Image (tube, grey):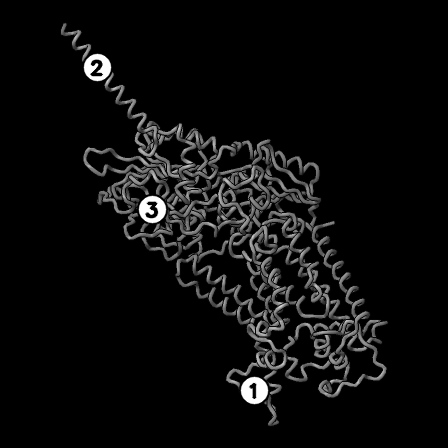
Amino acid sequence: MAPTRRLVLLALCSRGALLLGLLASDAAFPDLDSSTRLAAALPCAAADAAPPTPPNAAPVPLLVWDTAYFSRIAKCGYETDKINAFFPLLPALMRAAAAIAGTLPGLRVLPPEAAHVAAGLALNVAAFAAAALCLHRLSTRVLGSARLADLAAIFFCFNPASVFYSAAYSETLFAAGTWAGLLLLPTHHWAGVAAFALAAAARSNGILAVWFPLHALLAAWRRRGGAAPPVRDTLRTALSCGIILAPYVAMQAQAYAAHCLGEGEDTPAWCHARLPSVYAFIQKAYWDVGFLRFYRDPARLPMVLMSVPVAWLSIAPPPLGLCGPMTSFFVVPSFAPVSLEQLPAEPDDVTIICRQEALITQELQDVREYNKDAEPLGVIAVQEEVESEPEELTDEELTEEEEEDEEDDQLTDEEGGSDIDEGDAAMASQVEAIKWVPGTKFLVDGFRFQHPNCRAYFLTHAHSDHTTGLSKSFNAGPIYCSPVTARVLRHDFGLRPDCLRVLELDETATIAGVEVTPMDANHCPGAAMFLFKVPPSSPGSKAQVILHTGDMRWQPWMAEHPALKGQQVDILILDTTYCTPRWSLPPQSEVVAAMAEHMAAAAAAEPATLFVVGSYHIGKERAYLGAAAALGWRVHCTPTKHRLLRLLGLPAEWLALLTEQPEEAQIHVLSMGEQLHEQALADRIEGTAWKRAVALKPTGWTWRQKGGLDVRDLGSVQLVGVPYSEHSSFPELRDCVRALRPRRIIPTVNAGDPASSRAQVDRFADLMDLSADRSRLSYYLLRSQQQAQQAQQAQQSRQAQQVALA
């Protein structure tokens, strides 16, 4: 059975069990006060009269609590201002469903109250199944784990408050609308807004959903560095909030027209208030509801104390909390690993998928204690003359294939997902000290730390953990980058051409007196390493050679680059994503070949197999396009993704494999995160010609010591972990250090404090030139050995001179 059907069946079975329990309870324990139930059965416009028992009236099962009010509204409308506490969506649906049921044979004999209750129960059972399904998909997206999503859905179906979702109450419609809105808003904005509006028509607290479109606008404002968002986005947000608020405003207007604009003199007191809101008045006057009003009555203290454990379980972090991760919709789940040291030997879905974009905050400590002798950051006097500045990027250079839109693109999951490579447990550390190039006024990937002393900003590549702080309004200085990265910046951020300076790979340019040579980093398209040759800071001193790798995957051919061959590297600013011995990743070519072989075998076993390959905004192209080229298959991607790929300088034969028509391709490129789990894949092939879905996740975190691909069969869905990485493995990092023999290493990943940085550097100490590192004991031992050797040589020289004189 498909996962969706299993979940719907679970929801329906839980409702059936609870309804049977409610019927048994209603029969065994009659209401002590049946006036509300009896008033619901009275003729319209007589609800305030003394409620004698209607002749021959049998009690309607489950016509209890607020159900009686909803049934009365469905039957008679809003007769008095008191019942304006109940919003109209459920009564309207109950009335419509009862009317339709009344046309069916066998159901015409039901009294109105029974028909309304039956209709409300049926509607709520259907809405509950929809709410459970939305909650499951939303939990999968937020938590990044189908297992945790299953637990959330089960807890929803079988929790103590679930009784309210079984009676003819409005909570079920409210939950379904709210969760559907959260699920749809990121990808289908107006459908999400419509779902929020339906939730607001079911319950008054639905108007709080205006926060979600407002949050999207505020997030865009923050990404732009405080610059005002486009007028179009502002207007869309205002219209979205208006639609969500419309049911509440319309209900207040209807009540005011019905009770305050009549010709009679006996108008309710709330009509004369400064803000005549019927809802606020009746909640306080009739229902004793208000801000913290519940907690003012000492008699309710036991109920408050009973609610504390549940509240704590809802917000506490795991393992104490049950729903703590759900409070992290806009932040990082607290169970995500903080560093590579915390990763298990066999990472699971949570470790691989869950995002950590908000985990790294402002880290202001120095990167290492033994860097304290370095020159002050950002204040070194350098040669002012510019010998050969690269020319500004022109529109013609930027748009060799097509001029892109000036406005920022919204990078949705459909466009390729997040561009943070290899799982977010290893993002570039946001530490100002490691962003400065020692001895210069240059910042590399340091837009977050804009400084008036900075003469030039360098960008190694366009992944978002390296562009933090960059926005369309950036004007702090020129940005130096590769041609591909410049095109991506213009496409993604709408940066002005005069902000960008293109540095061609392998060509040396002199910038503020410093020779800079960009080299291929073998990472994502456009990624570059920068080799800086800093002139001597004082007479008699030597020039300093600094290599900033950015993100890179080291290969032996890199050491043969003319600018590096035979060069003594003083400082190596190194990508330390996989800086632990257990990460011995296979070569990319072997992984792509294994990936293509697995796909060919799966297609031979079932020709109607859809292959879904995970991708980031930029990156993984060599994985899915390389496999497609080996198989001769076409690759589907969205139009926005297609336009972006054409900017990356990919081989023409790879671009020829792309298509925007999904039915033309057996390989579909989707987001690495939310779209590569069992539920989403099963939904993707349901109702189509595809009989099986195979999802391949090309990320180094899926590597296992026993080798091979990590294959898991889940019915019609197969999940395949492909250990394809665009970062250096630990053996490759050691090869890099062995080839360059740097005097100092500055890590760029997991470098939030001196201790962790020093621990990473120590793993390469045997390969470095540490003769000048005074923070190590070996410096003094080596110095003593050198002094002893010099003394011995001097003595031997004197003895030789004495022999010669004799």
Say left or right for 490 vs 305.
left
Q: Which quarter shows the C terminus?
A: top left
Say left or right for 431 vs 77.
left
Q: Where is residue 7 in the image (x, y as percent from the top left)?
A: 71, 54
| Residue at the image point whose x is 60% and y is 76% from the top | 289
> Residue type at mark 1?
Cys
Q: In which quarter of the image is residue 284?
A: bottom right
Q: How crowded is mark 2: few (under 14 residues within 10 Å), some or many (20 or more)?
A: few
Distance between mark 2 and mark 3 Cα atoms: 51 Å
Q: Mark 2 points at which residue?
A: 795
| Residue at the image point whose x is 43% and y is 36% from the top | 760
Q: Name the residue under label 1.
A: 271
Q: Is mark 2 on a helix, strand or loop?
A: helix
Q: Position of residue 87 (x, y in %)?
A: 64, 75
Say left or right for 397 vs 454.
right
Distance between mark 2 and mark 1 Cα atoms: 109 Å
Q: Quick one: label 3 or label 1, which is nearer the N terminus?
A: 1
Q: Quadrant of residue 526?
A: top left
Label number found at residue 540: none
Residue 567 in sight in this render? no
Q: Position of residue 685 (x, y in %)?
A: 67, 49
Q: Name the residue under label 3.
A: 443
> Residue type at mark 3?
Leu
Q: Nearer the viewer, residue 577 or 680?
A: 577
**Mark 3 or mark 1: which is in front?**
1
- Residue 530 against residue 2 in the figure, above or below: above
Q: Residues within 10 Å of mark 3 (few under 14, many from 20)?
A: many
**Mark 2 or mark 1: which is in front?**
2
